[in-house]
Amino acid sequence: MYRLFILGLFLAGSYLHVYGQESHIRVTGRELPGDTVRFFTYREPLFNIKYPVARAAVTDPGTFNLDVSVSHTECIYTVDGPFLGYVFIRPGHSYHVDLPVLSGLSDDWKHNPFFNRALLHLRAGCEDCQTDSLEELNHVIKAFDSRFEPFRNKQLLRYYSPEYSRSKLDSFILANPVPTGVGDSTYFWRYRFYKMGILEFSVNAFNTDTLIAEYFVNRRVDFSLPPYRELFRMVFDHYYQHLARKDAFHDVYKIFNRGSVSELHDYLHADPVMQNDTLFQTVLLNEIYESYYSGDFPKDRMRAFADSVRANSEIMITRDMATVLLKKFTKLQPGQPAPDFHLKDVDGHEHSLDEYKGKYVCLGFCDMQSMSCLREFEYLKAIAARHSDYLSVITIIPSENAASVKQFVDENRISWTVLVAPSSGAVFTAYDVKGFPLFFLIDKQGLLVKSPAVNPSAGFEDVLFRIMKQRGDI
C-alpha cells in the first residue's frame, strides 16, 4: 500500500521577491512516527549542495504541518530508502504525492558503499490546478521523459552517424511539442528545451561552441532546472582544455596557474561564457576542482584560488560552491581536526571523539558481515591489549540493531570501544567511508595523522611507533 501524503501549498500573501511565497504543506499517512521528512532543492550543478525547503517530524497519528517557501515552479527532492524521489511543485497549489512502498524491499543497498540512490519521479497530482489531470506539470514531464529516455538510448547507438541522428532528432522534436493548456507551460518548454540540448550533445550533432551559443549565451542561468544542470556538466567538463585549443586562448592554463581571478577574467574577456559572471565562476570552480585532484597544479595554489572566489564573489551560489570546495580540499587531510561524532556503544552509553583527547586513537569502520573486517579484529585484539596506555581503539559498526552488535561483540570477545551508527549515519559521510574496513590514526590533540591509515594487519603498529618516535612520545 502506498504511503500517501498531501502537500498543500497555499499563497501566503504578497509576492516576496527574494525569499518567495510562504506556502503550507500538510502531510498525512506517514507510517513511521518519529521519522523526519525533509524536502530540498539543488541549485548548483557540481557538488549536489542541498538547499532545504521543508522539514518536519512525523507525529504519532502520522500527520504534521510545515511551511515551504517557493517563488516559482521548483523541483523538490526527498530521500526515501533507496530512492531519491522528486516532484515538481508550483506556488499556491495543493498536491497529493505517493511515496514508494519500501516494505519487502531488500536492504542490501545499505551495505553497498558504491550504491547511488535511484531517481524516482514520485506519483503526484495537483488537487486545485485549473487544468485537466493529463495537463498537470508532473504528468506532462513524466510522459515526456518516458518517450525521451528510450529515444536517447537509441541515439547513442547512432553516435557515428550524425546526419542520420540529426534527422531523427528533428523528427522527435516535431513529434513532442509543448502541449496546450499545460500548467506552467513556460517551465515545461524550458525543461523540454534543455532535454533536447542533452540529445544534441549525446549524438555529437553540434560542437561545444555551437551548444554554448544555443543553450547558455544570453539565456537565464537556472541550475535548479534538472536538465539545465545535466547539460551544463556535459558541456563544460574540462572546458579550459577546449579553450586551450584556440589561438586566442592557448595560454589559458598559464594564466590559470597564477591563481588570479581578475587576471583570468581579463584574459578570457572574448569568450562568450564571460558574458555571465555566474557561468564564468561556476566553470572556474569546476576547473579548480578537476585540477586539484589531477595533480597538474600545486594543491595549495588551487586552495587559494577557490578561497579567492569565495571571498570576492557577490553571487551566493558560487560562494556556496567555493565554500564546499574548500571543505573538500581540507577534509580528512593530515593535520586537520578529525570529524567529531556522538554515538552510543553496545550498552547504550554515548561517546564523542573529543573525550579521547590525550591519547592516540585508532578509529576503524568495520562491517560485521565482512570477512576482511573479521580478520582485522584479530589484530585489533592484540593492538588494544598491548598499547592501552597511550592508544584508544574505537570501532564503528553500521547497524540499525544495537542488540545484534552487542551479541557480535560478546561472541568475538571484543574488549575495546564499539560504537553503533545507522548505515546512513552522518559519521560515514564525514569520514568518506566507501568500503570496509577503513582505519584512521588520530593524535592526542584530535588531529588526523594518517588518513586513511594502514590496516592493523598491514603494519599499523609500526606506523604508530614511527610517528610517536618522531614526536618524542617514546
Image (cartoon, helix red, strand yellow):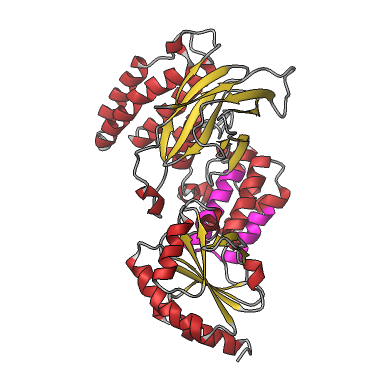
User: Residue 184, position in %: x, y?
Assistant: 54, 16
Q: Is residue 61 left or right of residue 366?
A: right
Asked if one can make out residue 252 in the rendered structure from this viewpoint, the answer is no
For the C terminus, the quadrant is bottom right
Quick check: can you spot residue 340? yes
Report the front residue among 221 and 345. Answer: 345
Region rendered in magenta: 281-308
Q: Residue at x 48, y 70 (%)?
A: 439
Query: Magenta stretch: residue 296 in it?
Result: yes
Residue 158 included in the magenta stretch of the image: no
Report x, y in % for residue 143.
38, 20
Q: Is residue 73 left or right of residue 170?
A: right
Report the front residue among 140 and 472.
472
Q: Is residue 293 above or below residue 22?
A: below
Q: Residue lying at the far bottom in this picture: please name it.
A: 474
Above or below, comparing residue 76 to residue 237 in the picture: above
